[in-house]
């Protein structure tokens, strides 16, 4: 099957289950409000006495360093809540991914909020363990990136003009993105084995390595093609966003809508990644 067929199959699968992105968007919005509203209240209560040259329409555009310099302990009473919410957010992220993979790999065409939550509960522990076992690979990723980028950093340090510095920075960014997609592909495939093949986590890692030993470059190529499409659409979104100024209420409202649309797009893009990976996996798993 040609690459275009895998991409088309994955996109169609994601479209048919677009409701998942809506569920995730609504949950993220609700949780964000739970976190942001109390913090915003703290900022206004502790920094409301300060005089600003102009009233910002978006208070969270305040520079974080300026906030701490102005009142270094204004979040002291709130720090425990922030730490709890951080841990809660990590757990919730794993839960969301478990539900997303479970529903995207399900043979059922219909998607319900109840089944999404059920899959989140069903695979949560194994997804958490898969993430913990991924930590050594993150260390390998960091060591590999530092090793491969060392010549570029040395070249940049010895540069006598700004162009080698700019070029070295761009190449380091590209190297970082390529390496990260390769390692992220491993974690995705492990979770596909957990859901689609009902494997234990360690067995899923072993199966993922065997599969990637035969199909890494083709599957990675598909991943990079989807990533390129996401980057292009993101760049177009950024250009459109720059046409509006946050200082005007009407433009600010449009920017908020564009921001929420972009979040929804990124959630849908995650569905496409999973669907394309699974489309290739289901076709080549016996080869």
Image (tube, rainbow, N blue to C red):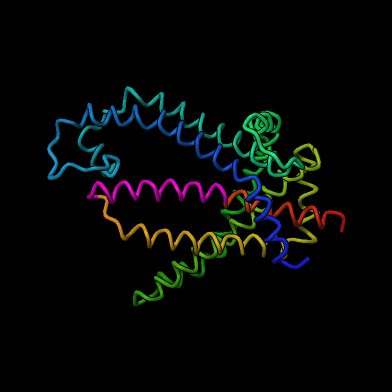
Q: Where is 190 relative to 225, above or below?
A: above
Q: Where is 168 relative to 84, above or below?
A: below
Residue 144 picture location, percent across and down: 60, 58
Image quarter of residue 97: top right
Q: As drawn, is 227 to the left or to the right of 253?
A: right
Q: As drawn, is 205 to the left or to the right of 236?
A: right
Give me the residue at 87% from left, 55% from top.
286
Give me the residue at 43% from left, 34% from top.
32
State whether the magenta stretch is mostly helix, strand or loop: helix
Q: Which residues are magenta?
A: 247-268
Q: Where is 170 relative to 115, above or below?
A: below
* Front residue of this view, candidates 97 and 203: 97
Name the residue furthest right: 286
Q: Is 188 inside the magenta-drawn segment?
A: no
Give me the residue at 49% from left, 69% from top.
171
* Front residue of this view, candidates 123 and 10: 10
Residue 283 picture location, percent across and down: 81, 56
Q: Is 258 inside the magenta-drawn segment?
A: yes
């Amino acid at each position: 099957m040609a690459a275009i067929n895998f991409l088309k199959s994955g996109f169609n699968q994601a479209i048919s289950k677009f409701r998942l992105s809506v569920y995730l968007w609504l949950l993220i919005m609700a949780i964000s409000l739970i976190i942001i509203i109390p913090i915003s209240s703290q900022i206004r209560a502790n920094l409301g006495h300060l005089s600003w040259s102009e009233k910002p329409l978006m208070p969270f555009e305040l520079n974080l360093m300026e906030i701490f310099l102005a009142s270094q302990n204004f979040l002291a009473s709130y720090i425990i809540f922030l730490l709890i919410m951080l841990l809660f957010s990590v757990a919730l992220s794993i839960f969301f991914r478990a539900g997303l993979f479970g529903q995207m790999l399900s043979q059922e065409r219909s998607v319900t909020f109840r089944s999404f939550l059920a899959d989140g509960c069903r695979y949560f522990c194994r997804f958490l363990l898969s993430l913990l076992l991924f930590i050594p690979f993150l260390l390998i990723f960091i060591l590999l990136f530092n090793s491969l980028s060392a010549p570029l950093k040395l070249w940049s340090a010895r540069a006598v003009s700004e162009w080698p510095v700019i070029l070295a920075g761009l190449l380091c960014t590209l190297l970082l993105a390529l390496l990260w997609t390769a390692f992220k592909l491993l974690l995705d495939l492990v979770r596909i084995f957990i859901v689609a093949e009902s494997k234990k986590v360690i067995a899923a890692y072993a199966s993922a390595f065997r599969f990637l030993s035969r199909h890494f470059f083709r599957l990675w190529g598909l991943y990079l093609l989807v990533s390129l499409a996401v980057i292009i659409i993101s760049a177009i979104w950024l250009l459109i966003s720059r046409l509006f100024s946050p200082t005007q209420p009407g433009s600010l409202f449009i920017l908020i809508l564009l921001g929420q649309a972009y979040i929804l797009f990124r959630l849908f893009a995650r569905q496409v990644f999973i669907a394309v990976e699974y489309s290739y996996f289901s076709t080549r798993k016996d080869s």
